[in-house]
Image: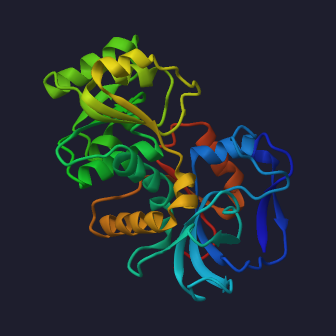
Amino acid sequence: MRSYRIWEVGSPTNMKLDEVPDLVPAADEIVVDVAAAAVGFVDTLVVSGRYQSTPPTPFTPGMEFSGTVRAVGADVDCKIGDRVAAYVLNGAFAEQAKAKVGAFYPVPDDLPLAQAVLLSGSYLTAHFALIERGRFSRGEIVLIGGAGGAVGLAAVQIAKALGAGMVLAAIRSPDDRDAVLSAGADAIIDLSVPDLRDTVRDQVFAATGGKGADLVIDPIGGAFLNAALRAMEWRGRLVVVGFAAGDIPSIKANYLLLKNIAVMGLELSQFRRHEPEKMKAVQAEIFNLAREGLLSPRVGRTFNFKDLPSAVDFVTQGRTGGRALIEVGGSE
C-alpha cells in the first residue's frame, strides 16, 4: 500500500509517497482501508517539526481518517467491513491506517465517510472544550476565538445546537463572516481592529447589553486571551484549546480573583488515554447531531490523495475557507 512518510521535517514537499507493506494490527488495534482523511492545523505543525510530540523519522503524519475495517486484532470488538472514523496521533495519510481501541468510532450507515472524518478531531475538541471543561449550560453567552477555523466553527455549531443563548464569533478575516453566521453565530467580534485589550470587551458588551461572556473558547491565544478575560461575566470560564496565533500569553492571577473567573486547558488526547468510553459517547452524539442537520463541517477544498502535500501547504497558508478533505479510497 502507499503511505506518505516524512524523512526530514520541514516543508510539506518533504513528504514522500512510499510503497510499504500492508499493515498488520496488534491485539488492541484495527487496520482500516482509508476512504478519506482530513488535514488540520496540528498536522502542519507535525510536518514542520514544531509540534510538541513529533515522532522520529520516518513516520506517516495525519490524525483524522475514516474508512472500512480490513483487519482486526484479537482483543478488539469489531469486525471486518465495519465503517469507522478515527482520531489518532499519526498515520492517517496513507491508504491503510491503524487505530487502537479508544481511538476509533463506529460511523452510522447513513452518514457519508467523507463527512464523518470531518466530524472527528475538531468537533471532539470543541465539544470537550464546551461541555467537559467549560461546563456549558443552556442559555449561556459563549465567545469563541478563531471562529472561522476548524475548532472555532465546530464550537459555534455545537454551542447553537445545544441551546446557547448567544454565540459571539471572534474572527480576524472578513472572509469568515458569512461562514460563522451561517453556522449560527449571533454576532461578530472583529479581531482585526487595533488595541484588542479594550475593543474586544467593548464589542462583547455592546452585543450582550453589558453582560459579558459566560464562557470563552480560545484556540488562538496571543493577545486574544487577555482581551477575552476582560470581556467575561462574573464567574465566567475560559478554556484554552491552543495557540494558533503563535504566542503563548501570560495571565495575571489577581484578575482571576477579582472577577471570580476560571481559566482551564484542554488537551484532547489525555481524554483518549484516560476516558476512552467518554470519547466514544461524545463522538456518537456528534454524529447524531450531524444526522439531524444541526452540524455541518465546512469544506474549503477537496484534494486527491496524490496531491496531499499540496493540501498540507494549503492549510499552512491559512485562510482555507474550511477544512482540507483528502479523498483516498472509495467514499463508501
Residue 167: quarter of image: top left
Q: Is residue 142 visible?
A: yes
Picture quarter containing residue 34? bottom right
Viewer-proximal residue, 187 or 313? 187
Query: Image check: 243 left or right of 189?
Result: right
| Viewer-proximal residue among 52 and 121 | 52
Q: Give x and y (percent) for residue 128.
A: 41, 51
Nearer to the camera, 238 or 331: 238
Q: Is residue 126 above or below residue 287?
A: above
Q: From where the camera sits, is residue 167 visible?
A: no
Q: Could you say where residue 64 lies in the image, as x and y percent from the top left?
A: 58, 60
Residue 168: x %, y % from top left: 27, 34
Task: Report the residue at 85% width, 55% height from top.
Answer: 58
Q: Quick check: 202 left or right of 331?
A: left
Instruction: Name above or below for residue 97 compared with residue 40.
Output: below
Q: Measuring 34% from the left and 65% from the top, which residue is drawn there?
A: 290
Q: How many circles with numbers are drawn on the protein?
A: 0
Colour scheme of the picture? rainbow
Q: Position of residue 90 (x, y in %)?
A: 69, 58
Outermost residue toward the left? 209
Q: Please say if 69 is above or below 323.
A: below
Name the image quarter holding the N terminus. bottom right
The residue located at (51%, 37%) in the rendering is 319
Frontmost residue, 125 versus 318: 125
Residue in the image at 39% along x and 15% along y:
254
